[in-house]
Amino acid sequence: MYGVLIVDDEEPVLDSFAYMLETRRADFALVGKARSGYEAIQLIHELRPDLVFMDINIPGMDGIEVIADVHLKFPGTVFILSTAYERFDLAQRAIPLGIFAYLVKPVSKKTFLSTLDAAQAALDKRDPPLTERAGDLAERQFLKETIWKEMGVAEWERCRELFSLHSDKGIVCLIELESGQARWCAEIAAKLAFRHRCLFTLHLNRGLYLIPEDVDRDALLALLGELIKDTVPESLFSAYAAGRVHQGTELFLSGSEALEDLKRKKNSADLQVRERLRIIQLRRMMRISALEELRKLFITLWEEIFASYGFIVAKAKMAAIFTLLLDDAAGCYSGHSEIELPFAPAEEIMPIANLADWADWSLQAFNTVHALVAARRSGQFPLPLVKAVEFINEHYAEQLQLSSAAEAASVSTAYLSRLFSEHLCTSFVEYLTELRVEEAERLIRESRMSIKQIAFSVGYQDPNYFGKIFRKATGLPPTMYAAANRAEALGSSEKDGL
């Protein structure tokens, strides 16, 4: 079976050719579609199709320019040109390139199928394709080895000619994903090829992209960010970076800069993930954990914030955190509340002059917030609610229903539901979910169990559903939460070893 690539910037043409190809011909398989000249070059190098339907009037390089760029590297590929107009000048340009056929759009089914028959006859007479083409090996070697060392002018000129690089400058970009690099990085490369000429390979589990153009680095990074957002699943943590534009003989500098930029961004991202995790953890644990445990978590949070940011920025972050904690304790910012706030975070925090004063003030303020939470939850709970909570705490890993808890408390489900709402400001389902997620977090931090095992241990029979619940509660999927905790543990062990 022969692989076919269709190149056209009109979706109806792409769909029509694909339909006729897939429904009428058993000897051909559609391997890809391209909508610009640069994307066509990229996909021809990646997919190595046997047959290419090439529109002439496409964005970027036109169809004939694309064929001129690649036909010597892929001599066995059959190219069929298509255009909306019959033009002798285009035919003249196509003749030296060995174009197999020339179609005028709209192309009838009869013409399309007869052209396929003729193309198949030509393909059947080809020499057997090599499993590895010299051009592909050379390009991979160029990206993985050559551009990482300083090149002489003569070597760079040979590379420019070999890989049809039309600029004397270039920039190296890197993308790192938690998983699925082969699929998602290749898809990003295909989309990137809409805008720029792009050489791509996977190197050390990263997507490596060489843009052989004198481009604006900031605009390129913004484009990469958009492509990652549109392509890569949100659950896969990603980091991307780029060097600066350099002369071709100094592309190794762009690669080194990209690596440094990637390292810096990963460190910053890890810091933000840890900070976010601790804030979420602290807010959730305020209602159910002992003061001493909460103090440790709070001190760890503010110590890392003050170690990672300037004093003024750190104070601003802590003012926001205290505002969240006060709202959790009194509901003062999320709705009407008759509770009078004990202090105004920003007004008291911003004038603090040094870290020692901050440590004294913050501990006292945290104790005040905790006392507010404790006072709110320490009212005389009705006995049925106490019994229901005790039952849930003991049986959360089972397939619990509100009716089971109501039966244990000897009340109706409607009455128990009202007790949860009035006294705990939550629902049965929310309380159970919070308890399960809290235990799942503990297991991720303290055990070597798999995410699937943890899901079963806290009462979820479907690990995928558990993942959605966990992400909704913590803001992170379980795999990323585990990775962040591993990174934190590694950082702590490295500090201990110093």
Image (cartoon, rainbow, N blue to C red):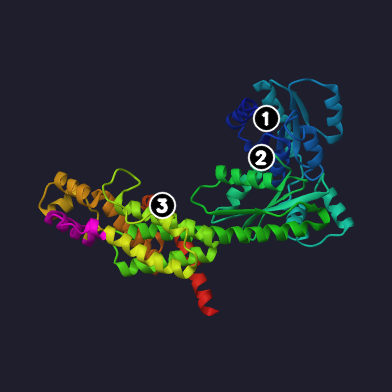
The quarter of the rendered structure image containing the N terminus is: top right
Q: Amino acid at mark 1?
A: Asp
Q: Secondary structure at mark 3?
A: helix
Report how far apart the C-alphas of labels 2 and 1 lie in the structure: 20 Å
Task: Give residue 438's quadrant in the image.
Answer: bottom left
**Is residue 451 left or right of 175 when viewed as pictured?**
left
The disc, 2 or 3, on the residue closer to the chain's N-terminal end is: 2
Q: Is residue 123 visible in this depiction of the protein?
A: yes
Seen at 25% across and 49% down, the residue is 425
The residue under label 3 is 471
How many labels, in total? 3
Q: Nearer the viewer, mark 3 or mark 1?
A: 3
As rendered, which of 153 and 120 lies closer to the eye?
153
- What is the x, y in percent for residue 481? 45, 59
- What is the x, y in percent for residue 475? 43, 52
State yes or no: residue 380 in magenta: yes
As rendered, which of 21 and 396 lies closer to the eye?
396
Q: Amino acid at mark 3?
A: Arg
Task: From this view, report whether residue 229 is shown above or below residue 252.
Answer: above
Magenta region, residue range: 374-394
As rendered, which of 498 and 66 lies closer to the eye?
498
The quarter of the rendered structure image containing the C terminus is: bottom right
